[in-house]
């Protein structure tokens, strides 16, 4: 069987991103368990559970997985169970060449977050001076050891004008794919809503520019942006990947029951009244609820052609 288990290692992180969504879960974990991170043994149990469910892939997420001392041990355990490993990271620790050298034989898929094409933009978003240089060095190390690299960009008002340049930079350091994700206004992103969340109207031309400039060099996927915002860009929108034909995926937060990720995500989306007239109504999830609550659904014009 195929399918992915998205398992949070914890919420500790060495960045302080303005768009970060985890503040609420982190506070909850701290209250419930007095810690924001899973133990090694807890994580091994989650890996065994993923194996029992018949899933093929496990995604190590956080917080920041690479700051854990047991990361290599856990990756090795997953591989011995026959699970393919994905690591979602800000890439800063990967600036240490020895770290990448040790991890390289495990053949993970590295999903590295880059939110700006320059230190000024990226460091401003992640809240850490010097982070851009470290992440870029990490990407270069991954390339040197011939690792499979994907890029992740969380869209925000701060990087909307730079999206095409970020995608171009990721392509130039060997990333095979980039995911451009619309921000979900939870945690810090909710607190800084006006600085973080762009309107779809302002975002659409920049997404079109990024696709036109770089889609021939790197695969581009766009997440949490409904089809009516980008007509003619069907193959780049993850809404289609998330349709009922999708692969199974489970999502395991700390101290919460494991859930079907597609079902949990749909519960957090909201569409407009006119969406019933849209030819994509069955596959489209609509925007995050917080977006519609803030901006309304006026931009969601049904596609009928
Ligand atoms: S269903 Fe609604 S949100 Fe989705 S593409 Fe159609 S109009 Fe847009």
Image (cartoon, rainbow, N blue to C red):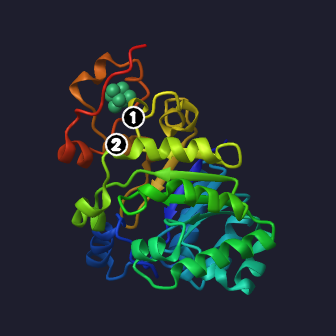
Within 8 Å of ligand 1, the CB of disc 2? no
Q: Is residue 75 left or right of residue 246?
A: right
Rendering quadrant holding ligand 1: top left
Asked which secondary structure carries label 1, the reply is helix
Is residue 188 found left or right of 67 in the rendered image? left
Q: Residue at horizontal 78%, vertical 80%? A: 101
Label 1 environment density (alpha carbons within 10 Å; few <14, some 14–19, many ≥20) = some
Query: SS of the residue at dot 2?
Result: helix
Q: Residue at x 74, y 86 (%)?
A: 98
Ligand 1 within 8 Å of disc 1? The answer is yes
Q: Dividing the picture into quarters, in which one does residue 184 lie?
A: bottom left
Looking at the rendered image, the quarter that the N terminus falls into is: top right
Q: Which residue is mark 1?
A: 229
Residue assigned mark 2? 200
Q: Is residue 157 left or right of residue 295?
A: right
Find residue 156 and report its horizontal and vertical position in percent: 38, 59
Residue displayed at 60% across by 53% down: 178
Dots 2 and 1: beta carbons under 8 Å? yes
Estimate the x, y position of residue 212 in percent, counting from the top left.
59, 41
Q: Quadrant of the C terminus?
A: top left
Q: Earlier in the sequence, mark 2 or mark 1?
A: 2
Count of labels in the image:
2
């Amino acid at each position: 069987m195929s399918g992915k288990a998205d398992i949070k290692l914890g919420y500790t992180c060495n960045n302080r991103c303005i768009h970060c969504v985890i503040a609420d879960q982190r506070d909850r974990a701290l209250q419930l368990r007095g810690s924001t991170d899973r133990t090694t043994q807890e994580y091994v149990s989650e890996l065994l559970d993923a194996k029992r469910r018949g899933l093929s892939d496990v995604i190590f997420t956080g917080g920041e997985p690479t700051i854990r001392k047991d990361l290599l041990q856990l990756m090795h355990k997953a591989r011995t169970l026959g699970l393919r490993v994905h690591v979602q990271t800000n890439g800063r620790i990967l600036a240490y060449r020895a770290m990448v050298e040790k991890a390289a034989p495990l053949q993970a898929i590295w999903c590295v977050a880059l939110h700006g094409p320059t230190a000024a933009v990226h460091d401003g978003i992640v809240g850490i001076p010097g982070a851009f240089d470290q992440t870029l060095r990490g990407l270069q190390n991954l390339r040197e050891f011939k690792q499979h690299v994907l890029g992740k960009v969380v869209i925000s008002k701060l990087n909307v004008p730079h999206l095409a340049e970020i995608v171009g930079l990721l392509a130039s350091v060997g990333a095979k794919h980039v995911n451009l994700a619309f921000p979900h206004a939870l945690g810090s992103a909710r607190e800084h809503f006006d600085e973080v969340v762009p309107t779809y109207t302002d975002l659409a031309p920049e997404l079109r520019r990024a696709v036109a400039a770089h889609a021939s060099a790197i695969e581009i996927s766009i997440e949490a942006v409904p089809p009516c915002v980008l007509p003619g860009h069907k193959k780049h929108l993850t809404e289609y990947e998330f349709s009922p034909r999708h692969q199974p995926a489970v999502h395991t937060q700390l101290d919460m029951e494991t859930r079907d990720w597609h079902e949990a995500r749909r519960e957090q989306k909201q569409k407009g009244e006119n969406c019933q007239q849209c030819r994509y109504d069955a596959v489209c999830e609509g925007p995050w609820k917080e977006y519609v609550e803030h901006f309304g659904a006026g931009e969601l014009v049904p596609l009928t052609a």
